[in-house]
Image (cartoon, rainbow, N blue to C red):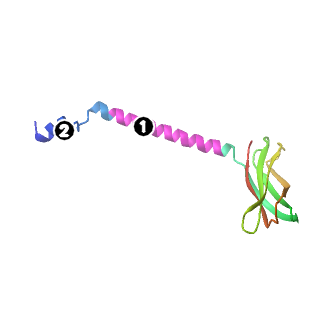
Amino acid sequence: MTIQARLDERYGRGRSGRRRLLAWITVGVLAVAATGALAWSTVSTAASDVDADVLGFSLVDQHTATVTFQVTGHADREVACAIEALDEDFGIVGWKVVVYPPSGEETRAYEVSVPTVSLATTGLVNSCWLP
């Protein structure tokens, strides 16, 4: 027996074939689980995807702003949207969450009046989701 073999045996540096096989099986199982989790995440996100596009914004008065937007998503499910009005420093001066019933159309247009605490300079849709 060589000195290197004795040192490997003494300090447990050598691996048996069984331990190596177990390590590869573990790595394979973890890789399959990670791939499955990524696929599930992608599919579930795509299935609940709702897109909102702002079409316009107008000021009614100092304490009311109107945001016109369209939502593209599932026609047979209700959609909730968070609408906000911003001031010139991009601070939120008005916020409203609105839930719309199913309409049968994939793309729908809406106009929402948002109460504000001061003069708004822009309005936008923060996000839309399926409740």
State whether residue 112 is above or below residue 42.
Answer: below
Main SS category, magenta section: helix
State whether residue 80 is above or below residue 18.
Answer: below
- Quadrant position of residue 27: top left
Label 1 – label 2 distance at C-alpha: 27 Å
Callout 1 amino acid: Gly
> In which quadrant is the C terminus drawn?
top right
58 displayed left or right of 46? right
Residue 113 is one of the magenta-drawn residues:
no
Residue with the mark numbered 1: 28
Residue at 76% from the left image edge and 44% from the top image edge? 74
Which mark, by number, is residue 8? 2
Residue at 75% from the left image edge and 54% from the top image edge? 52
Q: Nearer the viewer, residue 26 or 62?
A: 62
Numbered disc 1: secondary structure: helix
114 displayed left or right of 32? right
Residue at 77% from the left image edge and 57% from the top image edge? 84
